[in-house]
Structure formats: C-alpha cells, structure tokens
Image (tube, rainbow, N blue to C red):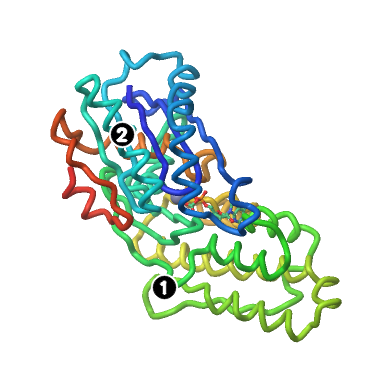
Amino acid sequence: MILALETSCDDTCAAVVSPDGVIRSNVVASQGLLHERYGGVVPEIASRRHLEVVDAVTSDALEWADVSLDDVDRVAVTRGPGLIGALLVGVSSAKALAAARGLALVPVDHLHGHVVASTLEPDPIEAPYLSLVASGGHTFLARVDEPSTYRILGQTLDDAAGEAFDKGARLLGLGYPGGPAIDRLAREGDPVAFAFPRSQPGDGLDLSFSGLKTSLLYRLRDLGEDEGARRRADLAASYQRAIVDALVARVEQALAREGLDRLAIGGGVAANSELRQALADRSERSGVGLWAPALALCTDNAAMVAAAARHLPALPYPDYLQLDATARLGPEDTRAAA
Ligand code: KG4
Ligand code: ZN
C-alpha cells in the first residue's frame, strides 16, 4: 500500500492507494472557508492549518481504507511546487511517518500528480496521451509517453486559467474561489453577448490569460456599475467561453501536432462544466478518448500523488532524511531527487 500526503496549497490531503492503482481512500480537508474572507490563500494561515489537521487527515485516510500503518509499504509526499511553508508540513510528516517504521519514501512533483491522476483505477488511461492541467497555480499541456514522467508542450505565459476565473470573479463581485461561482452564473448568461480575447501567443502551444482579465476590467468600466451588475450573467458566460475556447483550441492543436488520440484533464478548472462539455462533444465527434476524472481527482488530492509515486523510485530509509521541500519544481528535479 502507498500512503500519500499532499499539502502544497490550501488543502490537507491524505490517501491510500494499492500498488495496482485502486484508490482505497482519498481524504481532503479543505481550507477554502478559512481563506475566503481574504479573497485568496494566505500562506501562513495555510501552513498553520495543515499542521493542525495533518495527523487527523492521515488517520482518516488509513481508517477509511481499512488498513493500518503496518500495511503501508511506502509513503509518498508532494515535495513541490507550492507554498513552501505548506509543503514543509507534508514533507516533515511523511518523513516522520516513514522513518519511524524504516519505510521507503517517494518525493513527488505536484504537477506530475495532476498529469497522472487518470492512470488510477477503475478506468486507467494508457500512455501515450495528452494531459491538460489547468488549476489555480498552473496551466499547461503535457505529453505522457510513460507515466513516470511528462514533457511540457506549452504553458501559460502569465496567469493560470484558474487564476483568470478567480480574478474575473473578483471583478464581477463574486466570491472566492471564483471558478465555481462563474461556472454557476454563466449558466444563466449569454456566452456570445460580449467579445473577449482568445489569446494564442507565439506559434507553439502556449497560452495567456492576463489580457482577458484586463479586457473584463475595461468592459465593466465602460458599462458602469448598474449596467455591469445587470449584465453580470452575460459577462460571466462570455468570459468563461473565452477561457474554454482558448483551452480547447490548444488541446486540439496539441492532439494534432503530437498525433495523440487520448486526452486526460486535471486541475481545478477541469471541474468546469462548460469545458467538460466542450471536450466531451469534440471527443464524440473526433473519436479522441477523453478522461475527465471525478472532481475529487481533478482538484488537489493525495491519490494523484500516490498515482505518480507508483511509477517513481522510492528512497530507502534513511536516505530521505535530508529531503527538503521546494517551492519551485519541474519534471527534471523530481527525477534528480529520486
Ligand atoms: O487544482 P486546484 O484545486 O488547486 C490548485 O490551484 O492547485 O485548482 C483551484 C482552481 C481555482 O482557481 C478555482 O477557481 C478553479 O480551480 N476551479 C474552477 C472550477 N472549480 C474550481 N474553475 C472553473 N470552473 C469550475 N467549476
Ligand atoms: Zn494542484
């Protein structure tokens, strides 16, 4: 059994996954409400909260999986990227849990987790495939030829897609996190009421969302307060359509360029109903297989960390005692650490 911990941002997560990829438990203690009043994640508050709940979340994961620490062979943990103080809580806990029993430990790149979340049972995707990860902190397309690693094909040059949702929601006077709020409001609006830019920077597969947010700001200014409030649903629907269009366009270009016929999506924005529908419609037309996992596997969770750990070498005790969290981390760093 793999026991995995994930504390890179504002969710305290623990999961138990069997070596063949069956999720035995996937526990998330969300801090969303704690940060809501600040309109975003406050790093220091996140770290403190992780420290308070990480033991209980870990116990819950073991209990719900109906296993004990005696059944655990390896401990996996997100090493980065993320908030350094938050990451340190998970890394320290994982080291302590593993060291106390002389177990092996697998350091995992958080983004690798998002990329391979769909390789878990009951319907595992098989490589090669294209992965779209769109979250609050990251947005990129990656090619996966084997689940032990991934190659980034294109990424956002500025804001992440989730950040575009969150900033747009703030401009529209909706709550945090903004993605679900825009998703809901957009259902009542007209997605072609306003023209927002669909930026396709460069001739590769990169993305850009900062111009979109500025465009919404100017549009709201032009409309004035009353009219802006009255047209809020139309603005939300048009804004969301622009983000979805940009993501779908890049996905289609990437599939064609790379000659791939399987697509997995992940990250919080993969929960977006319009994005899921748009990709499902295209998948039906083109025959490209779509893996759009349940919400719990799209947003931050520890099962995806275990998913990556299944394919990575473990550090034997006591080699990992020097292991540190890193705020910035990419695929090469993970391999080097292992
Ligand atoms: O992956 P995630 O839980 O955390 C990280 O950022 O790593 O993603 C959170 C992001 C937030 O920006 C949130 O607004 C966005 O995912 N999000 C959504 C939806 N649900 C969450 N964006 C659009 N539509 C949604 N339904
Ligand atoms: Zn994430």
Q: CA distance from mark 1 to mark 2?
A: 30 Å
Q: Residue 96, labelled with which disc?
A: none
x then y, percent, for residue 219: 71, 82
Q: Mark 1 touching mark 2, by CB under 8 A? A: no
Circle 1 sits in a helix, a strand or a loop, which is it? loop
Q: Quadrant of the N terminus?
A: top left
Instruction: Judge by depth and name the residue closer to the eye, 125 or 104.
Output: 104
For residue 245, side relative to residue 71 (left or right) = right
Q: Which amino acid lies under the numbered mark 1 shown in the image of this protein?
A: Leu
Using the rendered view, name the quadrant where residue 198 is placed. bottom right
Q: Quadrant of the C terminus?
A: top left
Circle 2 sits in a helix, a strand or a loop, which is it? strand
Front position among marks 1 and 2: 2
Counting other residues with Cα less than 10 Å from the Cα at mark 2, is it few (<14), some (14-19), or many (20 or more)? many
The residue carrying mark 2 is: 76
For residue 122, side relative to residue 101 (left or right) = right
x then y, percent, for residue 307: 36, 36
Q: From this view, report whether residue 51 is shown above or below residue 283.
A: above
